Amino acid sequence: MEQLTLFAPAGQSKGLPKHLLEYTPSMIGRAESDRLLSHFIETTPWKQNTQKLWDKEYLTPRLTCWYGETEKIAGTLAWTNELQAIREQVEPLAGIKFNSVLLNYYRDGNDSVAWHSDKESIMGSQPVIASVSFGQVRSFDIRSKADHNEKYSVRLEHGSFLLMKSGLQENWEHRIAKSTRPMHARINLTFRLVI
Ligand SMILES: O=C(O)CCC(=O)C(=O)O
Ligand SMILES: [Fe+2]
């Protein structure tokens, strides 16, 4: 029960735009979430990609792995029992079927994902994305593309579910910022429909 102390208390921005985001804490119970956190950390063949910034190559500050049945993304692995079970749990909540999932592993507070929107053409212009988190609570920030001062945050808890609805990717960006506070590992799953 050591782990009880690992995760910070959760809170949310006031006035979170519900037409864009729907947050469900504890979609998956504590014991099962603990098991899944260790399972994904230990069994996923994690890769660290590189990204180009001002003509220089940098290591992406997190580890990733794609699973699913799409041929559009190179190196996608076959569904595991765990991922399949979670997919079946989120599909009715999202109201759509997903054919792929991106796993992100944030090892500590130095790992992050910079402001972006998931609007690749392979997902259509109005994608719905289902996000499941395990481990360290991290702040998921969104900001309006039209006005960067219009911002909200949701603290994504162990076992939580966040539905990114259609319209979010088109008009808003999101990120997981780095933190200078000591942080434990976090796993995030984003279920997507790649067409
Ligand atoms: O880790 C998260 O909660 C978000 C990950 C994300 O935005 C992405 O993989 O596109
Ligand atoms: Fe994203």
Image (cartoon, rainbow, N blue to C red):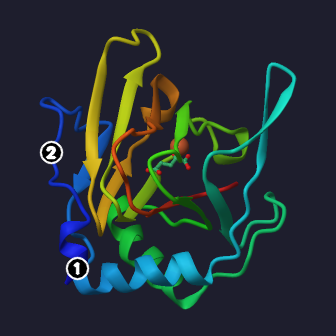
Could you say where residue 22 lies in the image, as x and y percent from the top left? 26, 48
* Chain-order first, disc 1 or disc 2: 1
Regarding mark 2 in the picture, which secondary structure is present there? loop
Q: Residue 52: x, y in percent?
A: 81, 31
Residue that badge 1 annotates: 2
Residue 139 in picture, x, y percent from top left: 32, 42
Which of 182/151 is in front? 182
Q: Which mark is residue 173?
A: none
* Residue type pointed to by label 2: Gly
Q: Residue at x 27, y 76 (%)?
A: 28
Which quadrant would residue 65 be assigned to in this image? bottom right
From the image, tell me which residue sits under label 2: 11
Q: Nearer the viewer, residue 24 or 122?
A: 24
**In the image: residue 142, left or right of residue 126:** left
Instruction: Count residues near mark 1 (Cα–Cα under 10 Å), then give few for <14, some for 14-19, many for 20+.
Output: few
What residue occupies the far right of the structure in this picture? 55
